[in-house]
Amino acid sequence: MSPLSPLPASWARRGGIPRGSGYGGQQEQGYSEERSSARRVADHYSARSNQTLQERESSPIIHLKKLNNWIKSVLIQLYARPGHCVLDLACGKGGDLIKWDKAKVGYYVGVDIAEGSIKDCMIRYNGDTDQQRRKKFSFPARLLCIDCYEARLDEYLCEDAPFDICSCQYKTLLLCSAEGLEFGNSVYWISFGEEYAEKKFPASRPFGIKYKVHLEDAVDCPEWVVPFHLFKLLAEEYDLELVLMKNFHEFVHEYLQKPEFTELIWRLGALGDGRQDQSTLSQDEWEVSYLYLAFVLRKPGQPSTQRRADNANMFLTEGDIEFLGI
Ligand SMILES: C[S@@+](CC[C@H](N)C(=O)[O-])C[C@H]1O[C@@H](n2cnc3c(N)ncnc32)[C@H](O)[C@@H]1O
């Protein structure tokens, strides 16, 4: 539903970059840089411990987190159907498991590069988190610790495929309106390297432009620009049509009109609770949310009727997590 920023780097290695991209001699060096960036991303997310409810509530971006959760819930409610087979790319600590459960999905495969996060996801799936002991989830699951840009997911997941939904709740930032090489506010900053001082990103090399992003209490990692019109063209090569694309401001304005989703946003507390609690997004959080993009791609065709839960369990141990090439 929302793609990963660095995807194009792997497309480049598979020849997905337009001809004459000029990667040539720089490829080896670029590759090892990518590997260490991937490691940094994995270490960053692995090191993030599960927060207590109190720690979470005192986060400077708590309302932004709640807004993100609301947007993810709305997307899942709009598109997931009972029995669906779900591939959650970059599933992290399984923050969306409850949402998938509410949608009554039939099978869940979670994939993430960060070992610590995937183990937390397993704990959450088993219902063993300290914060709340909850009833078990109603769907079987399979978890893989894997770098999505490196691994042949199609091979690893061939027995589970095709999936009804592939969800990628990472983030895509709209950087087209950026002014200067560095910009931000009290909760985030984004910085491009000096090499982009003139901001002339070569047309022959549209992917691979790296920037650093920092979001208080959440992200401190390198990410990569994705020219969305090219991403859309690549998606079309795979018969994927764009059916929804909205930055978070547009998304909020549209879906807040719908009573079923208004009630949910009050319940999650992203904009207060609709009554006494007036705590809401700060101006700076709202400004960050403008940079985020939600989109949905659909592959036309008949839904699959085959159910595939052979690899999956209703209770997972660390031995069940598949660590592949990390
Ligand atoms: C912002 S978190 C989102 C986690 C989860 N989807 C959620 O919404 O709660 C981004 C996740 O992407 C994962 N990630 C980043 N690069 C990845 C890669 N190359 N392969 C797999 N996972 C990756 C990180 O480890 C992290 O857990």
Image: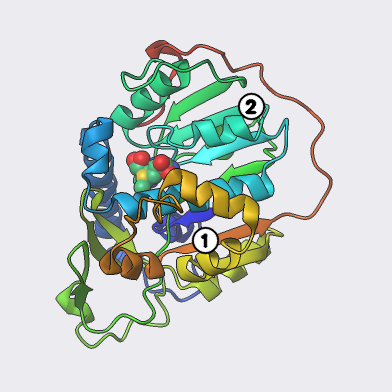
Specify the quadrant that holds the C terminus.
top left
Of the two numbered discs 1 and 2 in the rendering, the one whose residue sits closer to the viewer: 1
Q: Secondary structure at mark 1?
A: strand
Q: Which residue is mark 2?
A: 107
Horizontal arrangement in the rendering, residue 225 relative to residue 52 (left or right): right
| 120 over 211 or under it: above or below | above
At x 41%, y 34%, the residue is 146
The amino acid on which the numbered mark 2 sits, given as a three-letter code, is Tyr
* Residue situated in front as seen by the camera: 101 or 311: 101
User: Residue shown at 23%/34% (left/top)?
Assistant: 54
Quadrant assignment, res 91: top left
Residue 150: tell me if it is visible.
no
Q: How is the image coloured?
A: rainbow
Question: In this rendering, would 244 be left or right of 217?
Answer: right
**Residue 23 picture location, percent across and down:** 36, 68
Which quarter of the rendered image does ligand 1 occupy? top left
Under circle 2, the secondary element is strand
Q: Toward the viewer: 97 or 283?
A: 283
Numbered marks: total:
2
> Is residue 25 found left or right of 20 in the rendered image?
left
Question: What residue appears at the point 27 percent right and 45 percent down from the top-left corner?
Answer: 41
